[in-house]
């Protein structure tokens, strides 16, 4: 039995990286040859295990290692030096070196590659599974930030890119979450990565025989500029204008900011848009099962695990061609892909599914088959295990 350190910056969260980490940890637990152990890295500027520039008392304590529980398994959480400054979080530190040296293999599960630089001094086979590249992830957010805060974020991102390049050069193997991620790694860094999508539990996420199909559904970080929620609201307003009896739009995620709520009032759709807040996994299954279709309006996605969950529940998908979804969705067969930023195209395809029940059923059934064949968790774990066997 080989012990694997599954290292991530998002162990407590509920986003895409946490979902990736959970899938891989469960896959390793179910294997005969590997035993996962969670290691989390300092992400917050207020991290209590870190040396904080603005907290002199932390200077004496140094970088600490704390045992935590995230509800699934015990986690070793390791702080950093000068954690308020983003690039410092990617620096190696002795406390982390000591932790990682205890394992046979090191597997980073991250949103972007720079985190793997933290293992630079550890002599163990090290692998990186990344959702996207740094600037692909940040471009939309950097465009919306001006003034001193925007300049600082830009400067920190440029410095982090140096760690990104070094991290990719030092790891033994790179796993890319999608074809889109693989192509970005190849074009930007000349890195040949193995495509390894996240798997989904096809037993827990299942279709129902008679979906009610009485709402559009989006599951997203609603306030993230990269998700383009205002664009979705404009497309939906166009749907209601053409088809006043079209179903409501449900949005699952954090509480929307005032700008987004104001947009629903400006477009005259406030009474038809419901912000449902965060939902549990079991509640999401029910929402996927009974949606008329799932809609994604993003500017960029490493994969789009919510698309995968919708598809395996037999829910047709309308998504922008924003990177990751092209790995999952076969256009006009298991769903519909539209150009990024094209409100008219998104509106037309949403209307198309409102008006064509047989098409919805055909796409939903095809989606389920595609996930069972290519993205069920039993299939998706194989690229990782195949690579591990080489070391």
Image: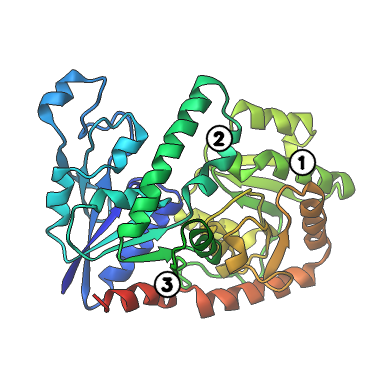
Residue at the (62%, 69%) spot, across then down: 314
Give the crowd class for mark 1: few <14, some 14-19, many >=20 residues within 10 Å. some
Q: Secondary structure at mark 2?
A: helix
- SS at mark 1 in the image: helix
Q: Earlier in the sequence, mark 3 or mark 1?
A: 1
Sequence-first disc among 3 and 2: 2
Q: Is residue 53 left or right of residue 87?
A: left
Asked whether residue 223 is in view, the answer is: no
The location of residue 386, given as percent across then percent down, is 33, 78
Residue name at image x 43 percent, y 67 percent: 193
Query: Percent from the top left, x then y, of residue 235?
Result: 77, 46
Looking at the image, which is closer to me, 158 or 332?
158
Please indicate whether residue 374 sits to the left or right of residue 387 in the image. right
| Between marks 3 and 2 in the image, the one whose residue lies nearer the viewer | 2
Name the foreground residue: 209 vs 90. Answer: 90
Residue named by callout 3: 377
Task: Quote the CA–CA distance across marks 2 and 1.
Answer: 23 Å
Mark 2 Cα within 10 Å, few/some/many (few <14, many 20+)?
Answer: some
Q: Residue at x 59, y 51 (%)?
A: 300
Separation of marks 3 and 1 at Cα, in angstroms: 36 Å
* Marks 2 and 1, the one that precedes in the sequence: 2
Q: Number of callouts in the render? A: 3
The residue singled out by tag 1 in the image is 234
Q: Secondary structure at mark 3?
A: helix
* Residue at mark 2: 142
On the image, the x and y values in percent for residue 330 come to 66, 71
101 shown above or below 52: below
């Amino acid at each position: 039995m080989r012990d694997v350190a599954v290292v991530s910056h998002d162990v407590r969260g509920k986003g895409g990286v946490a979902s990736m980490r959970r899938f891989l940890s469960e896959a390793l637990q179910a294997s005969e040859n590997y035993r996962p152990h969670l290691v989390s890295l300092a992400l917050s500027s207020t991290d209590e295990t870190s040396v904080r520039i603005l907290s002199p008392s932390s200077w004496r304590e140094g970088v600490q290692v704390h045992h935590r529980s995230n509800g699934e398994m015990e986690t070793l959480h390791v702080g950093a030096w000068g954690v308020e400054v983003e690039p410092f979080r990617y620096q190696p530190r002795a406390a982390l070196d000591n932790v990682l040296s205890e394992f046979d293999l090191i597997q980073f599960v991250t949103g972007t590659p720079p985190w793997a630089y933290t293992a630079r001094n550890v002599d163990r086979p090290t692998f990186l599974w990344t959702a996207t590249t740094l600037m692909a992830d940040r471009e939309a957010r950097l465009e919306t930030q001006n003034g001193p805060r925007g300049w600082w974020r830009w400067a920190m991102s440029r410095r982090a890119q140096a760690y990104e390049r070094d991290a990719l050069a030092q790891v033994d193997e790179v796993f890319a979450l999608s074809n889109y991620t693989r192509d970005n790694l190849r074009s930007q860094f000349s890195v040949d990565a193995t495509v390894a999508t996240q798997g989904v539990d096809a037993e827990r996420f299942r279709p129902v025989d008679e979906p009610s199909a009485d709402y559009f559904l989006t599951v997203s970080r609603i306030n993230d500029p990269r998700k383009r929620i205002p664009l979705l609201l404009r497309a939906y307003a166009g749907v209601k204008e053409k088809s006043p009896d079209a179903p409501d739009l449900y949005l699952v995620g954090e509480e929307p900011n005032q700008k987004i709520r104001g947009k629903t009032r400006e477009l005259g759709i406030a009474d038809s848009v419901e912000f449902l807040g965060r939902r549990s996994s079991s509640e999401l299954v029910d929402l996927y099962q009974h949606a008329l279709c799932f809609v994604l309006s993003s500017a960029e996605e490493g994969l789009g695990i919510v698309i995968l969950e919708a598809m395996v529940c037999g829910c047709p998908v309308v998504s922008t061609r924003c990177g990751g979804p092209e790995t999952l969705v076969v256009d006009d067969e298991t769903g519909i892909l539209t150009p990024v930023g094209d409100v008219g195209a998104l509106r037309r395809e949403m209307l198309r599914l409102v008006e064509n029940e047989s098409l919805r059923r055909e796409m939903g059934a095809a989606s389920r088959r595609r996930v069972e064949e290519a993205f069920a968790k039993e299939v998706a774990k194989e690229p990782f295990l195949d690579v591990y066997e080489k070391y």
